[in-house]
Amino acid sequence: MPEISNVKNALQTVVKKDRILGAVFAGGKSLVSSLARVLYAFWLQTTGLLYVFFTSLGIAWLIKHYRADHFANHTHLLVVSVFTLVCAYFTVQSFVRASQTIKKRK
């Protein structure tokens, strides 16, 4: 089985000699990196949306139990509060990263 470095060196030699093939590889590389950046931003926005859903569930639970028994069970209050705050942090972080990823130009 040929070594990866040997194949890479042979491919680089062919690409350097053929200008059209070099242009095709350069175009393909920029296309792949652009698509990867867009898909990564989409992934970050999707996970951010899931964290918005989890945060809203935590807030709904807190409102429900405040109206029902004014947080009689303090352990559940602590757990749900921490869960809601962590999900809210991840929501903001995910959308900020997605915004920064979209704005990048390479």
Image: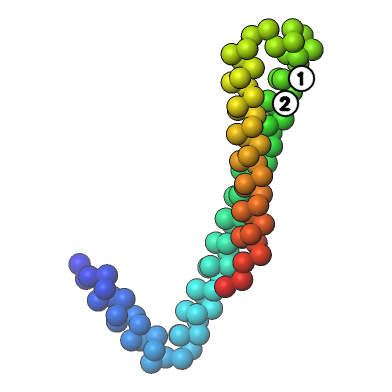
The residue located at (55%, 61%) in the rendering is 36
Q: Which residue is mark 2?
A: 59
SS at circle 2: helix
Q: Is residue 34 above or below residue 80?
A: below
Q: Residue furthest right?
A: 67
Residue 70 locus on image (x, y percent):
74, 10
Depth order, front residue of 38/74? 74
State which quarter of the image contains the N terminus.
bottom left
Residue 90 locus on image (x, y percent):
61, 41
Residue 59 locus on image (x, y percent):
72, 26
Proximity of marks 2 and 1: CB atoms separated by less than 8 Å: yes
- Taking the image as shown, residue 34 lies to the left or right of residue 29, namely right
Q: Which residue is mark 1?
A: 63
Q: Is residue 74 above or below residue 29?
A: above
- Answer few, some or many: residues within 10 Å of disc 1's Cα (few below 14, many 20 plus, some between 14 and 19): few
Q: Is residue 45 above or below residue 28?
A: above
